[in-house]
Image (cartoon, rainbow, N blue to C red):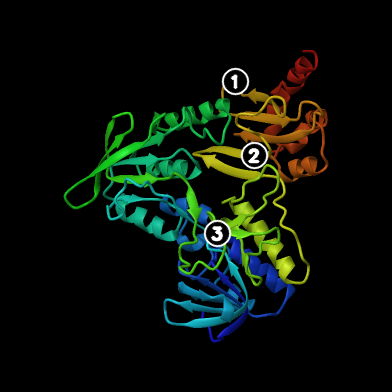
Amino acid sequence: MQVSKAHYTYIIIGNGIAGTTAARELRKRTQASILIISDETPYFYSRTALMYVFMGHLRFEDTQPYENSFWADHKIDLLQDRVTALFPEKNRLELNSGKHFQYETLILATGSKPRMLPQLDPKASGIQGFYHKKDLEQMLHWASSTQKAVVVGGGLIGVELAEMLHSRNIEVHFLIREAYFGGTLLPPEEGEMVTEHLRQHGIHLHLNDGLDSVALNDSGRVQKVITKKGATLPCDWLGVAIGVTPNIDWLPNKLLNTKKGFLVNDYLQTNLQNIYAIGDCAEIITPAPGRRAIEAVWYSGRKMGETLAKTLSGQPTVYDPGFWFNSAKFFDLEFQTYGQVSPQPNPTLEQHLFWQHPHKNYAIRLAFEPTTTLFLGVLSLGIRLRHRVFDQWLQEKRTLPYVLDHLAKAGFDSEFSPSYFNQMNFKTQWHVLQNI
């Protein structure tokens, strides 16, 4: 898209879910000029859909929710370029292309970048993380010459990589430092279920293990991995999925207060009055109880964008993350969580009821506060639940007995869910707890 202005009311750096949501919500409220700058792609796309491009289920253009004409139709200018310098005292940006722009309000929405292990040679071939479109392009480049792969890290990106590689008949060894998959995400029972589910799909799991070192061939491509337990794993490609870190290093002049990310107050404002940060790169100085200062998830980025648009449109709004919500898939096994469900809870503060299907990798866990019986949250594997229902119960501060009486209303699939809910013995578990 052609950019003709040198001055904008709002300039947004980053076109992920946070930056794009801010632009769209601002346009609903104002006719002021808006420019989005991104060095990654010209148009917004869904990062969570990149894996399906690799697997052949989608074309890349299918990951773009809006027609290319949408932005011009809504008078939102786009520019694919890289910001190289910020001069807050002049409200000025300089770009890699030599262009420069003035802004009245600047919004930083530069997202995350994959963390890498320090022992890895950054110049080595066939070693990468997975977050950006360029990461997808690198994987596509190496896939045709890869027969064996190793993935390091037991999180959601790690299991995505395992599924992607497996879909192309590439042998996958998965190094997980915990005793089961998702040790920081899932309670032991669900973790064991997902671990077994991955094994059933042909993934070679190495539990309580990690990467010690790698060996390269004569051309500098990864050739084998040595694990911390001493195992030697031949591989043509190594995926590093040990988490992400806020993408803030692009700003060389340290004019903004930072720790891991750009530090922001409850209104998502940095230490400079007309500069804000949202999404993965934003670090809340005083996060809400039970929430992290940085939450690198799609839902949080969208909500930050919505909140900031209200503030900038004359309706000052404190960022409220709402109730925690996340969802994912472990191959074909769906995962959902709403509210607070701790993997290893303090029993005086949080207790659980747990049901597991006798023959399938299906389970539901309900969390509650033992003294008041206040319902705290739910975690589900294999059974899809309704977000709206649980969000309403959490807002209304319902008790566990109320949730047990109405649990069938939370089933997403009206045909199959009732049979599962009828099998659940939550009320029996609750009765036993009441009589202990």
**Mark 2 Cα-neighbour bin, 10 Å: few <14, some 14–19, many ≥20:** many
Left or right of 135: which side holds 9?
Answer: right
Residue at disc 1, secondary structure: loop
- Which dot marks residue 358? 1
The answer to whether residue 110 of the structure is visible from this angle is yes
> How far apart are labels 1 and 3 at the CA level?
49 Å
- Which dot marks residue 270? none
Of residues 139 and 267, which is closer to you in this image?
A: 267
Left or right of 128: which side holds 145?
Answer: left
Q: Residue at x 74, y 30 (%)?
A: 368
Which label's residue is closer to the chain start, 2 or 1? 2
Q: Amino acid at mark 2?
A: Thr
Q: In the rendered image of this protein, does residue 93 appear above or below residue 365?
A: below
Left or right of 212: which side holds 386?
Answer: right
Q: Give the residue at mark 3.
A: 258
Of residues 388 and 96, which is closer to you in this image?
A: 96
Q: In the rendered image of this protein, does residue 303 appear above or below residue 351?
A: below
**Front: mark 2 or 1:** 2
Where residue 266 sits: x, y (%)? 70, 58
Q: Give the residue at mark 2.
A: 337
Q: Residue at x 61, y 50 (%)?
A: 293
Which label's residue is closer to the chain start, 1 or 3? 3
Where residue 227 sits: x, y (%)? 32, 34
